[in-house]
Amino acid sequence: MRSSAANAELALLLEVAGTPKPGNVDRQRDLAELRFEHFLAGAVGAREGLELAADGASVGSAFEQAIAGMATQEGDNTQFGALLLLVPLVRAAREDLSQPVAEAVVRETTVGDAAAFYRAFDHVDVGVADPPADMDDLDVRRGSDAVSAIEERGLTLYEIMERSVPGDDVAREWVQGFDRSFGAARRLADADGPLTDRTATVFLSLLAERPDTLVATRHDEATAREVTDRAGELVAADALETDPAAVEAFADDLVERGINPGTTADITAAGLFIALEHEAITV
């Protein structure tokens, strides 16, 4: 039986192996400076931090270690958002991987966890929106330079996530009980076919239901809505079964335009981990 840390690493590997995942790196598509092998190496590099979470370390310290390990590959940021979901889920799995327990884990985070979260930004370049005017000193892009402001304000990591909604759907998962992540796990269990195909199916269904916040941040809300609408049309037509070429064309178009629905991929990875832990899917 695999450990929770091993299942989390496997979830990262399965997520990037699924194809087609429009706009994202998968086993058939690379981006300009981010390749499939970078994601494989990032997943392996994150293992030590995931093991810390499984052993009961604080969420912040485990996350910081996971990011430091992930960042040792040449592609820089491969799975930052996915790990921000996976680390508390792995920590919850020590007791019971349920929504109430996962929610309790993140609500119990501390100022120290928030400081560790900010230090993680020293290792990678993460695409984030500008902070509100009253949070300039808390801009995560400042990394460890913002820790003194975090400590002065006494903000926990959960409170930082609360302040990041609605612009960041990874943060939204933290404050809404990982609702979409657990929903993705159920979809993966209900889907048919090889697990990499199920991953692509669930990714497209998640993309169709809600605009990706990373796309909105890097482009704009209109672009994010356009991508979701196009995904919705493909899902409604069951295009992965009836017209796979249309989904492949959509995937190629997003890559060519530099549109990367990375938040949707993060939630897909979290769903894979939950389904693996619950033995709802097997490999």
Image (tube, grey):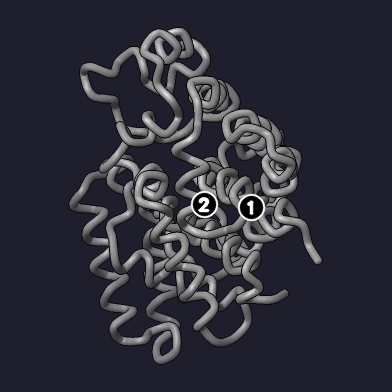
Residue at the far bottom: name it. Answer: 242
Give the labeled residue for mark 1. Answer: 95
User: Picture quarter containing residue 164?
Assistant: top left
Residue type (three-letter) at the residue carrying disc 2: Val
Q: Residue at x 53, y 57 (%)?
A: 270
Residue 194 x, y percent position in the rendering = 63, 82
Does residue 4 sit above or below 272 in this rendering?
above
Does residue 68 sit above or below 265 in this rendering?
above
Residue nearer the viewer, 57 or 75: 57
Residue 2 x, y percent position in the rendering = 78, 62
Residue 94 x, y percent position in the rendering = 67, 50
Is 239 left or right of 135, judged from the image as shown?
right
Residue at the far left: name it. Answer: 222
Q: Secondary structure at mark 2?
A: helix
> Pointers 1 and 2 in contact (CB under 8 A)?
yes
State which quarter of the image contains the C terminus.
Answer: bottom right
Q: Residue at x 66, y 59 (%)?
A: 13
Residue 171 x, y percent position in the rendering = 38, 42
Give the labeled residue for mark 2. Answer: 101
Q: Earlier in the sequence, mark 1 or mark 2?
A: 1
Does residue 247 sit above or below 267 in this rendering?
below
